[in-house]
Amino acid sequence: MNTKCLSSAAFALAAIFALGSGSASASPKPTPAPIRIPIPKNKMHSDFTVEVNHLGQIVRVTSGDWSHSAHFNHITYGNVLQAFIRRPDGTAVVGVYRISYNYDPRTTRISRSVVLLKRGGNWGNLPGAVEQMIAKQRARERLAAQRRAAKLPTLKQILGPTPKPTHAPS
């Protein structure tokens, strides 16, 4: 047997025993550092005027009164786009609503309130804002796939012309 193979096998065997023995020379496992999230110390408030369809989905945000914090604005705007406004029985009223968000630094909680401003509207049968965004993203993906497919060579270009037979089959 080759001595090089023996020394490799011996080393591998020694490594297995060293790992399995749990000796005191093994380094301790690292403890993860706690994640510190800065909590805002001042009150924040934002208002959004939205149009709601017959399913209770937000169709569009028509206006917004933003807070001084960009992070709070991103959170509340994303939340308002995904919101459903429905009655307790599950039905919805088409209309214009105001959704308000208030952050209280004493409790570190955000409260949301919804007020109906006006009933009705011609957007009652339109899809919700999230559905519209998904449809736009799918359309972009289809267009990108079509562009990629347009750049691919045809099978005829890959294989070249079909060769002619040199003699008739027998």
Image: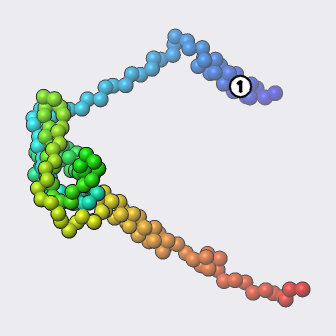
31 to the left or right of 6 = left
The residue located at (18%, 34%) in the rendering is: 109
* Residue 126 x, y percent position in the rendering: 27, 65
Indicate the quadrant where residue 153 lies: bottom right
| Residue 135 to residue 115: above or below | below
Residue 62 in view here? no
Q: Nearer the viewer, residue 134 or 90?
A: 90
Residue 167 in view here? yes
Indicate the quadrant where residue 139 lies: bottom left
Q: Nearer the viewer, residue 135 or 16?
A: 135
Q: Nearer the viewer, residue 114 or 147?
A: 114
95 to the left or right of 32 = left
The quadrant of the rendering that contains the C terminus is bottom right
* Residue 105 x, y percent position in the rendering: 13, 32
65 to the left or right of 136 = left
Q: Amino acid at mark 1?
A: Ala
26 to the left or right of 129 = right
The residue located at (43%, 67%) in the rendering is: 142
The residue located at (51%, 13%) in the rendering is: 25
Q: Residues within 10 Å of mark 1 (few under 14, many from 20)?
A: few
- For disc 1, the marked residue is 9
Considering every residue shown, the one lying at the far front of the view is: 89
* Residue 60 x, y percent position in the rendering: 21, 60
The residue located at (24%, 60%) in the rendering is: 53
| Residue 159 to residue 135: above or below | below
Q: Nearer the viewer, residue 123 or 60?
A: 123
